């Protein structure tokens, strides 16, 4: 299934080593002036970054082939094409019948009767996240025009940790500054230790994972559509579509299971005629609805599956055991790149939910 959305409908198409990737955004109203400076900047942050990323670098040039004219959206389906240039299918010739550990190769082999394109991961590749960044950039510019801001930082690389958000008060300037960085941290002093760990792991032919902490601020009370389009359920559905995401928490998340109700409940008080919270253990969401507090999300990103160390696998055609060495160009970690995709997915989800309670004039 390659389409999603309720009020804005998305269709993704393309494969990692195919000729083109593309996205169709349907039900985007006419008259929106697209911010290409923001879009190009966000795409640049998702690209590989020196020694801590893959050496495959796509320029991410794109072409709008429908839904845009004379600087504005037309109301027709808005379609972007993104050509692939820097790819090498020959890196995967020896893997046709040998599934790579940690990848989708094994279940996809059986689901698609060995007919799917597995080069670079095919439809399961992180390469397709460039489409999320295009979508998210359009949503971001609309949300920020309404003073709604979304940002994330690298909370950890393996066992090296950044500071955490103050869940009760997150300033807009902090999120804006995080969004300007390709390696966003609250405490930038920790960056050398993180990059040293990444580079050392890469030199060993291995990879590392980490966690991302994200925040959404200035939401009104009551965003969300229970039961099945609650804020948590919709965000989780979309965020798990990002390759490498293996866990999600809101607020204290799993720590809530170790608390008493007297500890976990976010209590209220009136201050200067307004309702204030005394804590934000529930991450700005109660009953699937936004509370007006910052929404706080933590995401677990697994280590990159493609590593150059020898691993055990099987030959599905010969039904034999094999020792596998993966060639090609791969990230020693994807946390710093996935983070910018996370921002885009959250931007789309929040905007899509918003439209339930706002008419199309709200866009402008």
Image: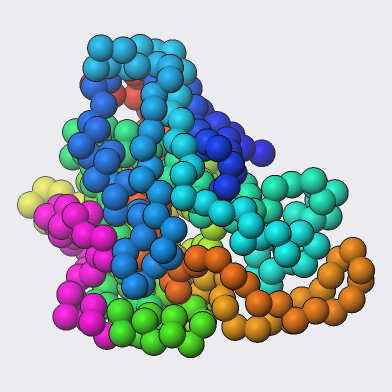
189 or 323: nearer the viewer: 323
Residue drawn at point x = 23 percent, y = 78 percent = 191
Q: Does the magenta stretch include residue 177?
A: yes
Q: Is residue 142 something one can see in this rendering?
A: yes
Looking at the rendered image, the quarter that the N terminus falls into is: top right
Bounds of the magenta segment: 166-193
102 or 345: nearer the viewer: 102
Q: Give the quarter of the image for residue 80.
A: top left
Residue drawn at point x = 68 percent, y = 72 percent = 101
Give above or below for 154 relative to 136.
below
**Of all residues shown, which one is farthest toward the front?**
90
Residue 95 picture location, percent across and down: 73, 64
Looking at the rendered image, the quarter that the C terminus falls into is: top left
- On the rendered structure, is 225 left or right of 282? right
Residue 356 picture location, percent across and down: 42, 28
- On the rendered structure, is 93 left or right of 194? right
């Amino acid at each position: 299934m390659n389409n999603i959305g309720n009020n804005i409908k998305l269709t993704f198409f393309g494969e990692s080593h195919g000729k083109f990737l593309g996205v169709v955004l349907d039900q985007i109203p006419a008259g929106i002036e697209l911010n290409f400076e923001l879009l190009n900047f966000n795409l640049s942050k998702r690209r590989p970054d020196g020694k801590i990323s893959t050496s495959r670098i796509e320029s991410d040039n794109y072409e709008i082939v429908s839904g845009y004219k004379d600087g504005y959206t037309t109301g027709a389906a808005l379609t972007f094409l993104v050509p692939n240039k820097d790819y090498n299918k020959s890196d995967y010739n020896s893997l046709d019948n040998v599934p790579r550990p940690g990848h989708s190769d094994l279940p996809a082999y059986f689901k698609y009767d060995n007919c799917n394109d597995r080069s670079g991961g095919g439809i399961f590749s992180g390469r397709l996240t460039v489409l999320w960044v295009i979508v998210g950039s359009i949503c971001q510019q609309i949300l920020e025009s309404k003073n709604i801001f979304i940002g994330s930082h690298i909370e950890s690389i393996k066992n090296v940790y950044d500071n955490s958000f103050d869940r009760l008060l997150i300033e807009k300037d902090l999120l804006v500054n995080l969004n300007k960085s390709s390696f966003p941290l609250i405490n930038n002093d920790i960056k050398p230790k993180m990059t040293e760990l990444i580079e050392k792991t890469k030199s060993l032919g291995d990879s590392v994972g980490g966690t991302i902490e994200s925040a959404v601020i200035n939401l009104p009370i009551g965003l969300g559509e229970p039961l099945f389009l609650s804020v948590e359920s919709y965000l989780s559905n979309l965020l798990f579509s990002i390759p490498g995401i293996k866990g999600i928490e809101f607020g204290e998340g799993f720590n809530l299971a170790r608390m008493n109700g007297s500890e976990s409940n976010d209590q209220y008080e009136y201050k200067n005629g307004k309702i204030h919270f005394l804590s934000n253990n529930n991450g700005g969401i109660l009953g699937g609805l936004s509370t007006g507090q910052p929404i706080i999300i933590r995401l677990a990103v697994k280590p990159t599956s493609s590593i150059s160390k020898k691993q055990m696998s099987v030959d599905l055609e010969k039904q034999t055991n094999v020792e596998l060495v993966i060639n090609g160009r791969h990230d020693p970690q994807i946390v710093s790149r996935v983070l910018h995709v996370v921002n885009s997915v959250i931007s789309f989800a929040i905007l899509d939910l918003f439209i339930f309670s706002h008419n199309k004039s709200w866009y402008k």
